[in-house]
Image: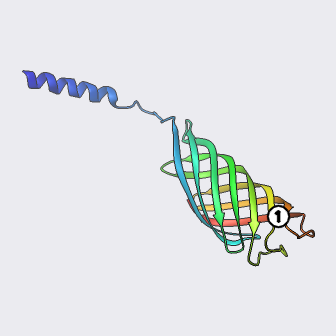
Amino acid sequence: MKCISVLLLILSVIAFAVPENGFEPRSTQLFPSVLVRYSTPIKVSGVFGIVFMQLHGNNCYSGFFTQIEPGIAGGKLNAGYRFGKHHFMPLYNIGLAVSIMQTWGSPLQDVESDQTYVGLELVGAFSMLGLNGGVFKHIAGDDEDSNWIYSLGIGVGI
């Protein structure tokens, strides 16, 4: 009789622990961001970051992200906010980032090496394809001809 009571207790706990139909978790999750990107003016780069995903209903999320992007002809640090849709992993997203970029080597667009820029970038992704575009203001270095530059890029990753 004691075994039957324990079994009934366990079954009742399990029955109340099962979420109802349509249940969606609402919490914050950390999600890694890793891409290989080709962009102007830093050419091929690796993007490594983290997204602080605030989960909402209907498989939507929003949150802050940070990234470091070392490349062949320069590197960037990005911090921004994005929103999107997810299932097991982000399905699509769009966001805005503040970026600081340093060039080295031989960058594209007639941009000289050893220059520093700060700018705004529109970033987005669909599945594993990432896109970015931004405008940057020259803040340090001796290249007086490139006060404003643009950046466009495409990448693959998560």
Residue lying furthest bottom in this view? 106
The answer to whether 16 is drawn above or below residue 75 in the figure is above
Is 109 located above or below residue 102 in the figure?
below
User: From the viewer's perspective, is 144 left or right of 32?
Assistant: right
Q: Position of residue 77 (x, y in %)?
A: 69, 58
- In the rendered image, the quadrant that contains the C terminus is bottom right
Residue sitting at x 52%, y 46%: 30
Report how many numbered discs are placed on residues in the image. 1
Split into 4 quadrants, where in the image is the N terminus?
Answer: top left
* Quarter holding residue 62: top right
Mark 1 Cα-neighbour bin, 10 Å: few <14, some 14–19, many ≥20:
some
Among all residues in the image, which is located at the extreme right? 145
Left or right, 137 with respect to 91, comes to right
Of 98 and 8, nearer the camera is: 98
Q: Residue visible at 80% across and 56% down?
A: 119
145 left or right, relative to 128: right
**Residue 40 drawn above or below residue 31:** below
Colour scheme of the picture: rainbow
| Placement of 121 over or under 56, stated as above or below | below
Q: Secondary structure at mark 1?
A: strand
The residue lying at 81 percent from left, 61 percent from top is: 117
Looking at the picture, how far across and down is residue 13, in whole percent? 27, 26
Residue 98 % position (x, y) = 75, 52
- Whole-percent x, y for residue 52 in the image: 58, 44
Q: Nearer the viewer, residue 138 or 10?
A: 138
Based on the displayed image, in which of its 4 quarters is residue 67 positioned? Answer: bottom right
Q: Which residue is mark 1?
A: 150
Amino acid type at image mark 1: Tyr
Is 41 in front, or is 73? 73
Residue under the point 16% across and 27% down: 7
